[in-house]
Amino acid sequence: MEQFDDSVIADFLRRSYFAVDGLWFVRVEAEYSFDEALRLDEQIWRIMPKIQARKARELLGVGGRSLKDLIRCFGLKFAAEGYDYEVRWPSETEAEVLILACPWYAILQGAGRETIASAIADAICTNEFTGWAKEFSEGIKFSLEEKMCAGQEKCLLRFRE
């Protein structure tokens, strides 16, 4: 049996993960409507952050539930999905995550679907990152303050404890 490098396996799984997300959305949209596809997608992305956050905590051995723990676990998610990002700490109780390149937005651009990107970000990104925050602590609040898909140069995710 042939052995494969972990980076080849990770790339294969990452591409499959993005493909299945896009394929099911497009099929539901074609069968029903964009609004119905977005409604169902929103339901999925209310649950997925719980699964991802719990697995990240487990894999990284993160036992705490602080803002710093959340941001550390985000590092795994962002690395796995291929984001380009920076983290800034305006204070001990506030973190800013600046997304400089988003793989999800790049996929929409590549498919010529930039016109739906902002609606998707409003529904999906907001739910996803709020879900991550809640998985760590009800006391961590999230706001999406800038969006590339709305014409801004970056996405700005703000988390406050």
Image: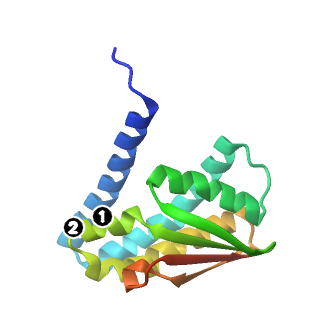
Which residue bears the numbered disc 1? Answer: 107
Q: Which amino acid, by three-letter code, is at mark 2?
A: Ala
91 on left or right of 120: right
* Relative image position of residue 12 (x, y in whole percent): 34, 41
Image position of 142 with respect to 25: above or below: below
Q: Residue at 60% x, 68% y: name it.
A: 131
Pick whichever, 27 or 102, lies toward us.
102
Residue appearing at x 45%, y 64% in the figure: 44
- Looking at the rendered structure, the secondary structure element under dot 1 is helix
* Discs 1, 2 touching: Cβ within 8 Å: yes
Using a 10 Å C-alpha cutoff, classify the residue at mark 2 as few (fewer than 14 neighbours), some (14 to 19) or many (20 or more): few
Q: Quadrant of residue 70?
A: bottom right
Residue tagged 2: 111
Foreground of the two, 90 or 112: 90
Task: Work out which residue is located at the far top of the displayed protein and give it.
Answer: 1
Residue located 38% across and 79% down the image: 149
- Residue 124 image label: none
Q: Left or right: where does residue 19 sit relative to residue 159?
A: left
Q: Position of residue 85 (x, y in %)?
A: 53, 64
Mark 1 Cα-neighbour bin, 10 Å: few <14, some 14–19, many ≥20: some
How far apart are labels 1 and 2 at the CA level? 6 Å
The answer to which of 98 and 149 lies nearer the viewer is: 98
Q: Is residue 156 left or right of residue 64?
A: left
- Quarter of the image containing the N terminus? top left
